[in-house]
Image: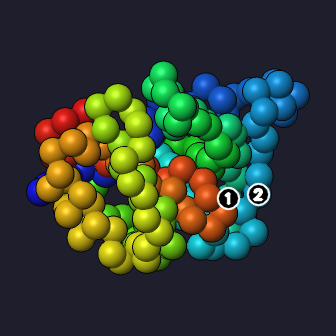
Amino acid sequence: MSFQIHALPAQDFAPLFAMSDAALAQRNACRVVVTKSPGTPCRVSLADARVGETVLLLNYQHQPAQSPYQASHAIFVREGVAEAKPAPNEVPLVIQTRLISLRLFDKNHMMMDADVLQGTAVAQAITAAFGNEAVCYAHLHNAKPGCFAARVTRLGEP
């Protein structure tokens, strides 16, 4: 079963980079200078930020659905990067190189199953999961430290 990994839209975060540190703090966000790479994965570019680069660290509601699984967590976003558009069935390197928590959801946004696996096994696990028609979408999280990484849908679905 073909799948698509989705990055977060760059335009959703662009206005934040013009904000003062005080205004960012009011939104539970801050600027961070990257001190190691890999280690600061951008959810827009689906790539690790470079050492010395300034990124925003902010809280992001990655599961906005009205369900017990509604959730948000911290993410990193780089300024001025293009939104990644992985090819169908492509797993970006930023995911392949990490331990990943795969979470599967049904049409009611209820978690049906979950697993922790090496990023190199993500494509196979997603393909197998989407063999079950009841699975509507998946979320990928970095198992260490646990931040949201990306949303995954069947090819052709939003």
Q: Earlier in the sequence, mark 1 or mark 2?
A: 2
Residue 32 vs residue 4, the one in the foreground:
4
Q: Secondary structure at mark 2?
A: strand
Disc on res. 102: none
Residue type, mark 2 in image: Val
Disc on res. 33: 2
Residue 101 horizontal side relative to residue 3, left or right: right
Residue 136 vs residue 90, the one in the foreground:
136
Residue type, mark 1 in image: Glu
In percent of width and height, residue 109 lies at 39, 33
Residue drawn at 54 percent across, 62 percent down: 142
Q: Secondary structure at mark 1?
A: loop
Q: Please indicate, yes or no, whether residue 47 appears anywhere in the rendered image.
A: no
In percent of width and height, residue 106 lies at 31, 38
Q: Residues within 10 Å of mark 2 (few under 14, many from 20)?
A: some
Q: Quadrant of the N terminus?
A: bottom left
Residue 7 horizontal side relative to residue 49, left or right: left
User: Which quarter of the picture shows residue 37?
Assistant: bottom right
Residue 103 horizontal side relative to residue 125, left or right: right
Residue drawn at 61 percent across, 37 percent down: 72
Q: Quadrant of the C terminus?
A: top left
Residue drawn at 60 percent across, 54 percent down: 147
- Whether 76 is drawn above or below 58: the answer is below
In percent of width and height, residue 17 lies at 67, 34
Residue 51 vs residue 136, the one in the foreground:
136
Q: Are marks 1 and 2 in contact (CB under 8 Å)?
A: yes
In percent of width and height, residue 57 lies at 70, 45
* Residue at the outermost right position: 22
Disc on res. 53: 1
Residue drawn at 42 percent across, 44 percent down: 111
User: Which quarter of the picture shows residue 156?
Assistant: top left
User: Which quarter of the picture shows residue 117?
Assistant: bottom left
